[in-house]
């Protein structure tokens, strides 16, 4: 389990016993042949979500219209 960040698991309150139980339940529900495809789909979904959040047009910097007023508006 050295691949999993132990600090993150400690924050979430998940110990090694709980992690093993969850993995066994997943194995029983989906079977050994489906788990790699599920993990791949989950990884692609996370990647697409991060890309969409990074390219969000609402977070782009808007131009400042106050700094250069148009002449003749006095």
Image: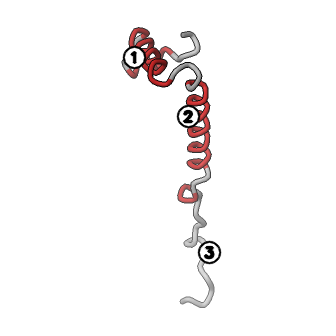
Q: Callout 2: helix, strand or loop?
A: helix
Q: Residues within 10 Å of mark 2 (few under 14, many from 20)?
A: few
Q: Mark 1 or 2 closer to N-term?
A: 1
Q: Is residue 17 left or right of residue 3?
A: left
Residue with the mark numbered 1: 14
As drawn, the residue found furthest toward the left would be: 13
Give percent across and percent down for residue 73.
56, 89
Which residue is drawn at the image coordinates 60% and 90% (left, top)?
72
Q: Callout 1: helix, strand or loop?
A: loop
Q: Is residue 51 above or below residue 20?
A: below
Q: Is residue 9 above or below residue 2?
A: below
Give percent across and percent down for residue 4.
54, 16
Q: Mark 3 or 2 closer to N-term?
A: 2
Give percent across and percent down for residue 23.
47, 17
Q: CA distance from mark 3 to mark 2?
A: 48 Å
Q: Residues within 10 Å of mark 3 (few under 14, many from 20)?
A: few
Q: CA distance from mark 1 to mark 3?
A: 55 Å
Residue with the mark numbered 2: 42
Q: Is the residue under label 3 in contact with that under label 1 (CB below 8 Å)?
A: no
Q: Is residue 19 left or right of residue 67?
A: left
């Amino acid at each position: 389990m050295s691949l999993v960040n132990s600090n993150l698991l400690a924050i979430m309150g998940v110990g090694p016993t709980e992690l093993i139980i969850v993995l066994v339940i997943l194995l029983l529900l989906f079977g050994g042949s489906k788990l790699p495809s599920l993990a791949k789909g989950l990884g692609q979904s996370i990647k697409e979500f991060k890309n969409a959040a990074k390219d969000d047009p609402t977070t782009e910097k808007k131009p400042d219209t106050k700094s250069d007023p148009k002449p003749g508006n006095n």
